[in-house]
Amino acid sequence: MRFPQLLIDVDEYYSQLTKLMSKNDCHLFFDTNIISQMYRLNSAARNEFYYWLNSLGTRAHVPNWAIHEYSNRFLTEKTSDYLGELAKLSSLPKTLEEITNFLKMYVDECLLVNPKYRDNKEVLFTELETITTNLRVISNALGSNEIQKVKLKVHQEMVEKFQAIALDSKIVNLLENFGMYYSFRYEHKYPPGFKDSNKEYNSAGDLLLWQEILQYSKEQEIKKVVLVTRDMKKDFVYAPKQIKENGIVKSNSQNKIKIADERLVDEFRSVVGTETFYIINFQQLVGVLSKSSSSQYRNLSVSVQIDPYFVSQTADKGNCELDSLEETSELVDSSEIPHEENMDTTSSISQIETGTVAIEQEITTKREMFDDYSQEALADKKFTLDEGNKLHAIISDLRSHNWPTQNFAVEKLYSISVNDFEITERVRNSFFVLGRNVYQSACGNAFKAISLIDTLPSFLSNIEQHILRKSFLDGALYEVYFNHDNEYRKDGCRGDYLRSLESCLEQEEYSDSLEFINKRLKPLLDAYICYPPLYDKEVIVSLSGKVDDVGFSDCFVVNRLEIDGKKSDYKGFRLALPCFVNIGHLKKTLSQLFAIDQRFITIKGLPDDIIKEHSPIYFDYSPSS
């Protein structure tokens, strides 16, 4: 048995996990709470999950005990427990009404610190009553009958999706002689499930589920297993004391990553013969899927970031960082901010004042002075970050590839206090790299970065200095076409949110940004399949192949892909272009890969019946093809 690990390399861990999950001999088992999670997702997010689940084929499994636990909830009509927030919504108006009545009874003017209410406390009560009225309308926005219909629909979906992958375990056989075995493990705190020993109901549920996994893996000679759960219980997993991230060793006090208890790994080894056993939660699973194809799992990715269950897991960390932010709230080093003694520390980035830099002639001079960016900024990974620079701290967090960290970093952009910037080359390069990393985070499905990019014109309008607005936009544009080595993305651009960037480029104010990116792309237009922003001509996508049976009826198997007459090696796009797509999804994916508006894409070469029936289009990524 291995001792608990002190240090874990986060990047290496997720790299190994991603590779493992893509292997055909790796099997995934789903805990009961993954079934219940389906109730909490909208239809778009559920369909993305089901798409991935179907792709696993015979590698996906649901233990019998998990179905038993869910069945008990369903048959006793307790699936509403999965949607506890709905009950909170319905109770909010009454709760606020009670608070309002209490305040009317209790409050004197001397208690009110806000001048708005101190002069007339009735204003406070009127506003509370208005909020209560609006809440009452909102609380009735969802119909109870409609909610029940959706719940039944989700149940039917799960019957269709999960029944086929349910284990045929002999639960009765597992229960034989289970009493002494169960008592011994729990008495000696041996995982899993000993934390449930005092539960009145289902105290041995986790242990039975674990025994099912071991039994099935042994019988089927499965050597690589990933257990997907929503709860990372202390009698299943543990958090190493330290983590290594981007080459830096730091404390794991916030439990940023938890891994399978070494005693479970050892038991898996003793039964199966290998130590390849992982436990991940639903959020980690979706993170892995998002990295494989961000656009394909976008709704699912956003859902796990805003789900109150997962948000609560990072609440303490967020509060801690907010506290420290209040103490040091400069966007750049103080040496780079002129007139520091006049700084208004309550000003946000949305209130930046330009001072003398606002003079149009000086802005023009600055544009000419900084016609381009440093090689370190263009090759993003070479850009050195200064730990004492608060803008660089945001960039560092955006590079974390961790959604909670990235989302909080975006929040800092709206809250960090600053009065002015001296337009230096370093500051301009920093804003360029910031734009790159915000856009990169959006493409990685960090939902607050998505929100910022979706409303980019509004965000940029709050930064007074044009030269910095341009630098941010230039960086975002550059990220679409060039990787962190400053090389053109020949294996596919990041056109996910190019339309949002183009909404800025359509403004005369940002003509210099359009000129910047066009100058960078011009030498590449003949060598690569490459289209500049605002491209508005028809793009012909020609597919060659034949209708064949690849596990699907009437499936079109592609053997050649051409874009405007240029042959494209589609195998280079395998991370973004899945094996099976329909024509609508293919257009969307190609739009992102080549950074072109899908309205201008015309696909040719497909038989009429394939188009009419929305039949699958198959891209074969096997080595021999």
Image: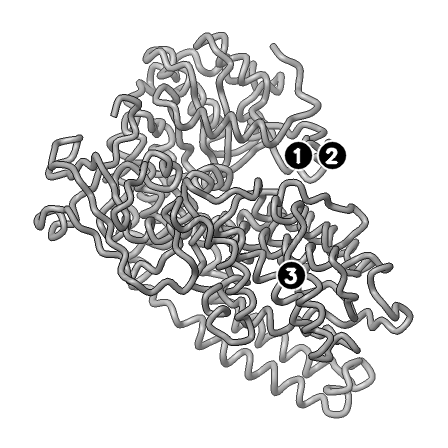
Q: CA–CA distance between discs 1 and 3?
A: 34 Å
Mark closer to the chain start, 1 or 3: 1
Q: At label 3, which amino acid type do we have?
A: Asp
Q: Please, is residue 340 above or below residue 496 in the view?
A: below
Name the image colouring.
Answer: one colour
Screen quadrant of the N terminus? top right
Q: Residues within 10 Å of mark 1 (few under 14, many from 20)?
A: some
The location of residue 241, given as percent across then percent down, is 71, 29
Q: Is residue 38 visible?
A: no
Residue 271 visible in the displayed image: yes
Asked if residue 453 is positioned above or below residue 528 in the image, the reply reads below
Which residue is at 72% across, 50% downward? 393
Q: Which mark is residue 250?
A: 2
Do the CB atoms of the residues marked 1 and 2 lie less than 8 Å apart? Answer: yes
User: Which structural element holds mark 3?
Assistant: loop
Give the camera-side residue of 416 and 590: 590
Image: 180 above or below 348:
above
Q: Position of residue 134 (x, y in %)?
A: 49, 79
Instruction: Give the foreground label among 3 and 2.
Output: 3
Q: Amino acid at mark 2?
A: Lys
**Left or right of 285: which side holds 464?**
right
Q: Nearer the viewer, mark 1 or mark 2?
A: 1
Mark 2, secondary structure of its residue? strand
Q: Is residue 283 above or below residue 195?
A: below
Q: Quadrant of residue 344?
A: bottom right
Give the residue at x 58% y 43%: 402
**Which residue carries the number 1 mark?**
245
Disc 3/disc 2 C-alpha distance (Å): 38 Å
Tag 2 or tag 1, which sits nearer the N-term?
A: 1
- Per the image, the residue denoted by label 3 is 371
